[in-house]
Amino acid sequence: MKPVLDVDLGGIPLRSPVMAASGCLRSIRDVHGLVDVRRLGAIASVSVTAQPVAGSAGPRVAETPSGLLHDTGHQNPGLDVFLAQELPVLARTRVPVFASVGGATLEEYLRVGTALAEAPGVVALEVNLACPSAERGGALFAHRSDHAAEVVGAVARSTRLPVFAKLTGDVADIVDIAGACIQAGAHGLTLIGSIPGMGIAPASRSPRLGAVTGWVSGPAIRPVAVRAVFLVSRAFPDVPIIGVGGVADASSAVEFLLAGAWAVQVGTAMLVDPDAPLEITKGIIGYLRRHKIADPSQLRLALRPARPAADGGSS
Amino acid sequence: MKPVLDVDLGGIPLRSPVMAASGCLRSIRDVHGLVDVRRLGAIASVSVTAQPVAGSAGPRVAETPSGLLHDTGHQNPGLDVFLAQELPVLARTRVPVFASVGGATLEEYLRVGTALAEAPGVVALEVNLACPSAERGGALFAHRSDHAAEVVGAVARSTRLPVFAKLTGDVADIVDIAGACIQAGAHGLTLIGSIPGMGIAPASRSPRLGAVTGWVSGPAIRPVAVRAVFLVSRAFPDVPIIGVGGVADASSAVEFLLAGAWAVQVGTAMLVDPDAPLEITKGIIGYLRRHKIADPSQLRLALRPARPAADGGSS
Amino acid sequence: MRRIRAEVLSSRNQGQHHTMTIVAPEIAERARPGQFLQVGMPADRSFLLRRPFAIYKASRQGGWAGTLEFAFGPGGAGTDWLRTVRAHQFLDIIGPLGRGFATPKNRNVCLLIGEGYASGQMYFLAEELRAKGKKVDMIIGGPTQEAIFKPIEGKRLAASVTVVTEDGSLGSRGTIVDVLAAMAGQTGAEVIYAAGTTPMLRAVAEYCGQQRIPAQVAIEEAMACGWGQCFTCVVPVLRKDGSGIDHQRSCTDGPVFNSSRIAWDALVPSATATSTGSGSGSGSEGAGA
Amino acid sequence: MRRIRAEVLSSRNQGQHHTMTIVAPEIAERARPGQFLQVGMPADRSFLLRRPFAIYKASRQGGWAGTLEFAFGPGGAGTDWLRTVRAHQFLDIIGPLGRGFATPKNRNVCLLIGEGYASGQMYFLAEELRAKGKKVDMIIGGPTQEAIFKPIEGKRLAASVTVVTEDGSLGSRGTIVDVLAAMAGQTGAEVIYAAGTTPMLRAVAEYCGQQRIPAQVAIEEAMACGWGQCFTCVVPVLRKDGSGIDHQRSCTDGPVFNSSRIAWDALVPSATATSTGSGSGSGSEGAGA
Ligand SMILES: Cc1cc2nc3c(=O)[nH]c(=O)nc-3n(C[C@H](O)[C@H](O)[C@H](O)COP(=O)(O)OP(=O)(O)OC[C@H]3O[C@@H](n4cnc5c(N)ncnc54)[C@H](O)[C@@H]3O)c2cc1C
Ligand SMILES: Cc1cc2nc3c(=O)[nH]c(=O)nc-3n(C[C@H](O)[C@H](O)[C@H](O)COP(=O)(O)OP(=O)(O)OC[C@H]3O[C@@H](n4cnc5c(N)ncnc54)[C@H](O)[C@@H]3O)c2cc1C
Ligand SMILES: Cc1cc2nc3c(=O)[nH]c(=O)nc-3n(C[C@H](O)[C@H](O)[C@H](O)COP(=O)(O)O)c2cc1C
Ligand SMILES: Cc1cc2nc3c(=O)[nH]c(=O)nc-3n(C[C@H](O)[C@H](O)[C@H](O)COP(=O)(O)O)c2cc1C
Ligand code: FES
Ligand code: FES
């Protein structure tokens, strides 16, 4: 049997379940010779806001055990420049683009979302809910089901493109927030964004990031992300879920697909190893072949019970 | 200058700021030759419930990148056996014991808490709020400020011993929950317990834990824990905070102390390396000496701004 | 129980297996068959836990006095690293850990069963039993010839050694369980010791239960500490009063258990019967699959 | 820009510094002074990121054709590992990355400043400038003699080399900044190039600004990718219209910047004046200390 890689995220056909995560593949003109972009299933753009954002002061990245601590302060060129200069470059790759929508208010999300949805090459919107609300003292939209649902619902109603709600992992009940987003009209979910963290350098006694606190990504957060995917996919088996957070190799990608993800995104691992998406893609094919599974979507149904139940798990 | 290690957690004098974390030093009779227990500042006991709990099926531990995924299902011998057999062994070490209180209902917390508070050797209670509520469909007490405060307040009112509220890291607003606990009567906070996670083994296609989902501990969660300590200590500078989560060496312990912790607990690192607490203690002394700081409590005030502000941070 | 920095005397690939000899007089002195070592991993790795390995030889006299040997098969990141450690480098070792095999007073005919690398500890046990004047027979098995660990040691130590491989590449074709009844009958086994995969151990336990032959099995469970503190390594054990199960620490209360005490249904599905399901607790969040 | 598996030709400790020569013809071919390599760390470590190192030599002809050299000082986990890599092992390299130093058309007298290991890339630059017929003088400095990287190379390449150490153990006692004005005057510098710590670079920039000498500085900023994708490596750059700052990627738009374009106040406190405070954005959560 020759497995295929194609997946269908509820009407969005992708040639591979391996996507680039938002904010981690921003400048296609600089990837020449490093990433064979056309082998990606899709690219999630950086989160775009209505106005340009200069972002936070450096340092913007530090290492944590098996992870990165980062904060760009949402630096992005703003909607107009993104549409005029950056999105066309992404679109030219012919790889489906998930345009990531940022915002500080409902109105901003709406304005950015509707504009991005019209642009060529964009097959879906990914609403990044890890943005601080200007009207609620900087609380993240992703932190409350009503705030998240309000934004996602408004964006979903304003476009015919499918909308993915991207949630954060630092919430007590992710199933509740996911459910509210689905109810409000989300076509799917991207689980999860980085989780909040901080580092301090003992030698200098100062925070490792200019922004003081930041976001943890990479393998360190994988168990948190896998759990989120597992719980939400069990609750909503028909809703497309994109798993993200620490996907670093084929084995971790398969872990997400078994947990219930329909596709995965790769961020940190690609920054470190530009070949990661391709290696992961090849590895998934190899896994499917060895396990005699026809395509990635079958993995969603292939999770077995924990040992010692039924057919055993120690093989 | 010869720095001292003594700290005072608001009336609780400890000879060292390095404690053993709850659930990670359970059987003193088996540590002989491995851990010099008397060098510990304090020992947090395993969380005790009213009745014995057999706990979850194995496997109970798996590795995650720079972390552990674990779940014991709160296995403990129950209040009576703990008081009769286990606590006396802890007390005999003469190391101050923080007795960890578990429960599934307010009544259970109260019953366990009041009984433990009477026992010899116990200098404080640590209320483990990462327990599922029997009356609220398994929601963790730590997940809502009102639920957390209710339990902590009741236990605090029932005893004259100081009560530490132990919170989890998977919440949107830890400052809010911490504040509610303080308001309710908590003397201090233990930040943080492990964070929820899951792992799946691609080879067997089954969850890595018998309990399916579990808890992530170890260095992987350190940035999450440091941030929690930092935010809460900035909000409540006079409230003793015990930092826990990925303390693995002197440098990570100092990171917590700079973030605002009054003491630290070591869990995972001690399981892997029984000498870890002692090495950390020695390393803190060395750090204090090199930085000409008199005692660990001074580190709380020693955090400098992030680069590039004021006096610079790249030294 | 000690923690030591142990010099590696030799590190040898032997087919699928790798054996290491370390200088550890404090541990060798006291080590008993069935006990194990916890081997520390290097700093800065993404994997943290020590790796447990059964002690396969402990030399107390002669040229090798004060040395220990352990052996391991193909594995993951930890054993991959361990394979790169060379003679004269040092390992961070805690041991000897756990309770070893008990030696019967009144039973003199012993059948020892070892699967794959687990034969190693059985050779150690065979030596001890022989020194106590017991009769020792062995069954050693594995999927292929490659997986059979040092059968020659068995030949040296036991009255008889039966080798089985699933593909027939060494000894007779089949599994340990296939030859168990015949060998137990033939040797007149009064006590059985087994180490290897859990499904095999369960099958041995079931046979011994039916035949009322006492059996001791060495269980391998994932463990965080190895020295009794964390309760992650537990094995479900039937209460003596029949009122249910207790979770006992395999690192400290085991790894050797009396096979009749184990609540096998809660540990591993039966190969022969349909499982009656797990009797043990559920997940911390009710998130069971 | 290429990613290659590069064989290590030699790996040498030289006092505090370590130099590595690797076989990388695809990169050596195109590498320019000021550009850098991203060196991959081994799998399974708890630290993930590639480490950036400036290229200190790129040989395009002769016996060493197709090789590259880089050098590093004492550091943390990554450089500790790198020091253990031996000849004939392989490194995972991406390069050449970033924009190198620009060579002036009409300015012929160049003063090159290198601090610690950063002198390495200045020797590379000196060679290129000399080949273009420029006059090259150098200042190299560091805290101690140990920290001065290969001063002999400077002597070979530059018309004059001024060595300064803070403890006076080599050359004159003092800092680079102490001798800057004198040396710039003495050599008649028309353009200044500098690499080293950010406070030193700022001091150089301030001097050059006052004296209206064009200066190019190589900035070291922590970076996640090194190839333009993540915007973590940014440097605050003044907008041409004076309306504020932009954050430019030091990996791709730098690491070499025209010193007058950098918004120094947002990058590093001034050694000479009280800082006017940071003009850049704040934390993602308003959690500023
Ligand atoms: C008491 C005891 C004695 C053992 N004796 C031996 C021996 O003599 N020779 C030998 O080759 N192996 C033995 N094992 C199994 C051995 O511990 C594993 O092979 C080893 O831990 C695998 O590590 P890894 O990094 O190669 O694999 P990985 O799969 O990367 O390990 C990941 C994690 O799972 C754990 N793990 C993986 N397999 C096992 C297993 N079978 N049992 C327990 N934990 C496991 C590891 O310790 C580690 O924590 C023994 C296990 C126990 C509990
Ligand atoms: C463009 C550029 C060129 C450089 N050239 C050289 C060179 O030629 N020789 C040399 O010795 N060093 C050079 N550095 C600094 C070098 O990257 C660090 O010394 C190295 O990354 C330290 O790694 P570590 O693991 O030893 O230290 P750790 O402190 O463990 O590193 C932790 C993290 O911080 C980063 N980091 C630490 N120090 C620096 C630094 N000074 N600049 C940027 N990131 C840092 C690391 O890359 C890593 O991500 C250069 C940096 C940049 C940006
Ligand atoms: C440098 C960087 C920038 C990021 N920018 C964005 C962003 O603009 N929008 C967004 O939704 N997520 C952003 N993310 C989060 C990633 O898309 C991803 O959710 C997270 O990093 C976890 O995946 P990983 O472990 O594969 O990196 C960013 C992550 C990194 C490391
Ligand atoms: C095996 C194990 C058992 C634990 N049991 C408890 C417990 O009973 N009560 C509790 O409050 N925390 C318990 N914890 C959490 C630890 O006390 C600690 O908060 C957490 O592990 C993070 O710290 P660490 O990274 O140093 O391990 C346990 C952790 C581990 C690894
Ligand atoms: S492994 Fe920790 S108690 Fe057994
Ligand atoms: S390091 Fe990623 S853009 Fe520069």
Image (cartoon, coloured by chain):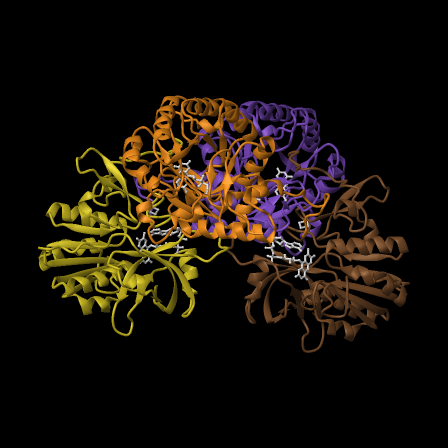
Chain colours: A purple, B orange, C yellow, D brown
- Is D118 rendered above or below residue A243? below
Quarter of the C terminus of chain C within the rendering: top left
Q: Position of residue B215 (x, y in %)?
A: 43, 39
- The residue drawn where x is 18% and y is 58% is C112
**Left or right: D65 as drawn, with respect to B275:** right
Q: Nearer the viewer, residue C115 or A13?
A: C115
- Total residue callouts: 0
Q: Does any portion of residue D102 appear in the rendered image?
A: no
Nearest the viewer among C3 and D37 is C3
The part of the image, by quadrant, that contains residue A310 is top left
Residue A115 percent across, percent down from the top left? 71, 31
Quadrant observed for ligand 2 in the rendered image: bottom right
Q: In this rendering, is residue C124 above or below D206?
A: below
Based on the displayed image, in which of its 4 quarters is residue D195 positioned? bottom right
Q: Is residue D210 visible?
A: yes
- The reply, left or right, for residue D96 in relation to residue B283 is right
- Quadrant in the picture for the N terminus of chain C: bottom left
Which of D54 and D160 lies nearest the eye of the viewer?
D160
Residue sticking out furthest to the bottom:
D63
| Vertical placement of residue A11 versus D116, above or below | above
What x and y, as percent, mark residue B72? 36, 38
Considering depth in this image, is C59 or A220 the residue closer to the camera? C59
